[in-house]
Amino acid sequence: MNGEPEQRIAEESGFHLLEHDLGGHPDAAAELRRLAAEEAGAPFDLEHGPLIRGRLVRLAEDDHVLLITLHHIVSDGWSAGVVARELGTLYAAFRRGEANPLPPLSVQYADYAAWQRKWVDGEVLREQAEYWKAALARAPELLELPADHPRPARQSHAGGTVGIDLGEELTAGLKALGQRHGATPFMTLLAAWVALLARLSGQDDVVVGTPSANRGRAEIEGLIGFFVNTLALRVDLSGSPTVAELLGRVRERALGAQQNQDIPFEQVVELVQPVRSLAHSPLFQVMFAWQNAPGGRLELPGLALGALDPSDSGDSSAQVSAKFDLSLSLWEDGGRIEGAVEYATALFERETVERWLGYLRRVLEEMAADDAKPVDRLNLLSAAERRRVVEDWNATDAGYPAGACVHDLFRAQAARTPEAVALSWQGERLTYAELEARANRLANVLRRRGVGPEVRVGICLPRTPELVAAMLGVLGAGGAYVPLDPAYPRERLGYMLEDAGVTLVITDSALADRLPENAAGLLLLDVERDAIAAEPADAPESGALPENLSHVIFTSGSTGRPKGVMIRHSSVVVLLHWLRENVTDEERGSVLFSTSINFDVSVAEVFGTLAWGGKLVIAENALELATLDEEVVHVSMVPSAAAELLRSGGIPACVKTLNLGGEALPNALAQGLYALETVEKVGNLYGPTEDTTYSTYYVVPRGAEQVLVGTPVANTQAYVLDDHLQPVPIGVVGELYLAGDGLSRGYANRPAMTAERFVPCPFGAPGARMY
């Protein structure tokens, strides 16, 4: 009034109780569920009230259900106990015909509100404000838990619940742990919760919200009202603390927060000014509540009471309201800690939350057993899950010819289908027989020039059929080809020649000046065209074995100086047999060859097609796709190129399959490609050069919510590991490690790979997730 806030207290309105008689109802249980759901969802009129209401549902003469609903603005968890105690007291007195026995309240909620406003004014407000600004300065915006679904742009409050019971033995162990370190059960359980959240998120700076009863004075313990405040507890898990050290950090934070708990949480948010988003709550997205408020077990004389079964009330997971991503509530009852997790169903599946509660139990068990153990070494995985991620997902063994080399597969295919078209380029077509003859003639020349097993031969040619014939010719002579992009600077080409130990380069006179002088001998195809054409078309004896090199391909140098990766024939043969099973005959019937042979995808494009009777359509780059004379069914490219083609309308209707790799694949792009309707399959492929082109593969489903790394290809093992080289839980961020038959022999002029053939990806795969 007159510009000043005014409090108005409504006149006594009584308790409104609706009665429903379901006696004789044909489906009383279903009607009870409907009434309970209706009561739970009915809005309150905050201006006129009432803010408490009830329903009494009669199921039979001796069977009733009482539903009491209070708005949170006038009640909290502590208030529920007060309501239960007072209801029991009043019922007993009125049953005996007595008057209201409850004593008058010494203070009202209005008195508390006025007192609190006065208390947090002035110096107290200033000191507590400084505490929270310092405690939450530069706190992380979001706790990045591995969700099953992408976070919606606007937070959804639909939720579900999963229960947990720690049992008497573990409860006793946790109490003993807390006593040894001066930690309350709240502190001990919070330490385990933040330890788990840190492991799941990969973050060592974790902020968790927790409710504070905020009833520090005896006069207000018996009041019904909203007293609870929310505290944001920030816990530092950096430096690999032990369990004991983490308990100490949590204890310090909890005590500091309790000493500065008088400022309402809304004011703390205004003080800290975190990034605001409609997608998640500010400061924290996960709660922890230790429910130790005085109990209020309802006792009504003459009646046998029991809690309503949620299945009878309609309280299904779909009706739970989740204010945060996760909310863990625990309490002790009869010497055992139990509780539940409330979770946002827009983010998590029930099975995921159940699995995480299993992790929490194991964290608590290990904390109670060994408080000197580093928190980041606490075991999360059950034996079954460890077996699943280590063994079951890596059961990729597949047979392939043990004695075959890459050129053997091509020659065998040429013998089967000599008249089939192998190459198409600018109107020119070569059959398998013609391509093999060209390759064999060049191989015979190379043999006389000293090329054989382990000899590295550079190839510096434009993208024409001669390039493919040169690759096959080097292999047919027993050598290993080394791609040399004519567009590279001379200095880089010189480094590659020296590092790979190249003594001979196949090129032509127009490109010869791109190479450093006297760096290697030259075989000029245009100059020696007639001499090469005079060579026998029969294949020479290569002398190459599967363990010999097929090629040396250099990394991009994005993580340092480029390294020449030495790839064996056997590794390529493994890849080719996987491609035979995962590329259909229709797709292989017309494959775009647009990738530079300096990139390992070219190995799959060229040999994955020619080893099994497909046709290569040669193009200068993928952006020419729409202008080619020849129809193409199967293409491989980086996602950015696919995005450009999609924007420009450059993907013709003949393209059915796109394999995308070399960059992260956005799901929006994958679904945009499917929106063309003519595209039938979008594959996400990942693999470092050191693992022979592809390591994992995932066919993105039409309508998928996200793109995954996928599962290992044949004879490859992929492990997502933590900093201690232990497998992380399903979906959790880690570094991707690879093993198997596809691994390279090492780097040119550098030590070989580890004897275990188990190496981390050179540029890692942060955030790798496999299913």
Image (cartoon, rainbow, N blue to C red):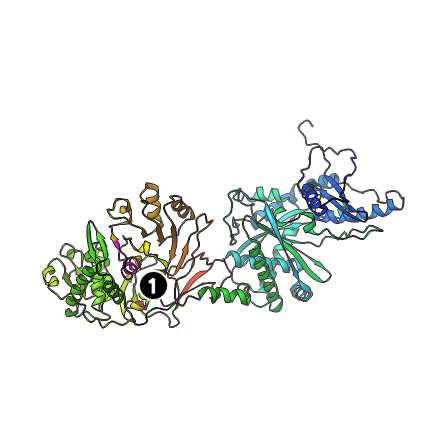
Q: How many marks?
A: 1
- Horizontally, residue 684 falls left or right of residue 611, namely right
Q: To which residue does mark 1 refer?
A: 575
Q: Is residue 533 above or below residue 676?
A: below
Res 555 → quadrant:
bottom left
**Magenta region: which residues?**
602-616
Confirm whether the magenta stretch covers residue 613: yes
Q: Pick the quarter of the image with the N terminus.
A: top right
Confirm whether the magenta stretch covers residue 298: no
Residue 149 spot, x, y in % from top left:
51, 50
Residue 590 spot, x, y in % from top left:
28, 53
Q: Is residue 12 above or below residue 216?
A: above
Q: Amino acid at mark 1?
A: Leu
- Horizontally, residue 403 falls left or right of residue 539, namely right
Q: Which of these two is toward me, 642 or 510?
A: 642
Residue 755 spot, x, y in % from top left:
37, 73
